[in-house]
Image (cartoon, helix red, strand yellow):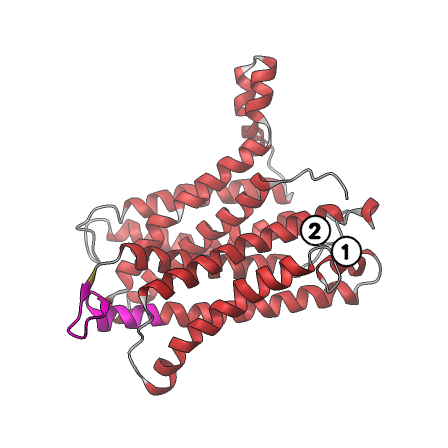
């Protein structure tokens, strides 16, 4: 096995940046869609959860990638405090390389997401308040910025022809869909954990304003079903593209096919547990609402578990992709 140059900090960065970008994109989309009366008026609360979530994984993930540059270790070893800011060089050299463009897009996304979260901080924040114009302006910016960051995490790897496992145009699509799905999962997880609940007459615990909440949660859950479906399709296209390409890509992708070193982790951990299991559970509650117009009512505990599994699957996807791409470098196949 080749020595791994990129470890958990890079994997954590790709995952967290994807979750943050996905949450920002979904929150912005919900807020803008809700302006026309969508989500039965509950769009603002959903957008608020996404807004408050988005900057946290973006900032933490960026901190992890800065640590991976060994800025602090080098500064201590050489006794030169100026080396602590070596990462700023990424912004001083402007060109069309994925690293340069991605650094600027990521920085702008972090700044915009912090401002967007600020507009939701007050408990009295609501549609039409004094921050409404700024909030909607940052939402319009957030959709393309969030998508750009999510796509960039895939392009960063896909732009390396020396790594045949990564060198696929489908990787950016796969990371984009996964980012949106984990963003939805993060929002629903926060809602399930911190949303107001009350005891209904039947003894079950429901969200306050249950009809409104169930409709809003249903729309997010059904959207997640579609996103997971697209993610499964993207995985199929990723493998298909590699096998239709002559040479190294087909050999490289064999590590996740049956008999490969990462086959069990990929197919059981990512596909079965991280994708198929949650989508089947979500369908169990989405279909009655979709076909028979029944109230959407996924139990709180199941909703927390489903969201957690989706997030774990998103992390495992990045883990497999990053590590497999390194052990299947030119000298490894």
The magenta stretch spans residue 215? yes
Q: Residue furthest front?
A: 203
Q: Residues within 10 Å of mark 2 (few under 14, many from 20)?
A: many
Q: Is residue 8 visible?
A: yes
Badge 1 is on which residue?
252
Q: Which residue is located at x 54 percent, y 64 percent?
A: 273
Up-down: is 263 above or below 216?
above
Q: Which quadrant of the figure has residue 36?
A: bottom left
The magenta stretch spans residue 301? no
CB atoms of marks 1 and 2 within 8 Å: yes
Q: Which of disc 2 and disc 1 is earlier in sequence? A: 1
Q: Which residue is located at x 65 percent, y 43 percent?
A: 97
Q: Position of residue 15 (x, y in %)?
A: 52, 49
Q: Position of residue 188 (x, y in %)?
A: 36, 60
What range of the chain is rendered magenta?
Answer: 198-218
Quadrant, the N terminus: top right
Foreground of the two, 225 or 155: 225
Q: Which residue is located at x 19 percent, y 68 percent?
A: 209
Q: Position of residue 87 (x, y in %)?
A: 56, 29
Q: Is residue 28 visible?
A: no
Alpha carbons under labels 1 and 2: distance apart:
8 Å
């Amino acid at each position: 096995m080749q020595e791994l140059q990129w470890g958990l900090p890079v994997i954590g960065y790709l995952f967290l940046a994807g979750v943050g970008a996905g949450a920002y994109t979904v929150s912005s989309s919900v807020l803008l869609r809700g302006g026309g009366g969508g989500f039965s008026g509950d769009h603002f609360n959903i957008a608020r959860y996404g807004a408050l979530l988005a900057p946290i994984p973006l900032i933490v993930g960026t901190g992890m990638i800065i640590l991976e540059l060994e800025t602090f270790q080098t500064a201590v070893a050489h006794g030169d405090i100026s080396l602590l800011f070596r990462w700023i060089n990424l912004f001083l050299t402007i060109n069309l390389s994925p690293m340069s463009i991605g650094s600027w897009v990521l920085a702008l996304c972090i700044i915009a997401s912090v401002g967007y979260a600020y507009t939701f901080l007050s408990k009295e924040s609501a549609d039409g308040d004094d921050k409404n114009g700024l909030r909607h302006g940052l939402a319009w910016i957030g959709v393309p910025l969030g998508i750009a960051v999510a796509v960039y995490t895939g392009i960063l790897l896909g732009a390396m022809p020396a790594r045949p496992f990564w060198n696929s145009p489908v990787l950016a699509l796969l990371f984009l869909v996964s980012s949106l799905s984990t963003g939805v999962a993060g929002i629903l997880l926060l809602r399930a954990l911190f949303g107001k609940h009350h005891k209904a007459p039947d003894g079950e615990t429901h969200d306050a304003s249950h009809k409104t909440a169930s409709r809003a949660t249903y729309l997010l859950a059904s959207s997640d079903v579609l996103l997971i479906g697209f993610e499964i399709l993207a995985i199929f296209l990723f493998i298909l593209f590699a096998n239709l390409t002559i040479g190294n890509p087909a050999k490289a992708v064999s590590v996740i096919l049956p008999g490969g070193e990462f086959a069990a982790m990929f197919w059981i951990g990512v596909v079965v547990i991280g994708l198929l299991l949650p989508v089947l559970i979500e369908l169990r509650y989405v279909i009655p609402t979709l076909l028979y117009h029944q109230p959407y009512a996924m139990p709180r505990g199941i909703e927390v578990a489903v969201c957690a599994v989706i997030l774990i699957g998103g992390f495992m996807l990045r883990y497999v992709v990053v590590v497999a791409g390194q052990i299947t470098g030119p000298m490894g196949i």
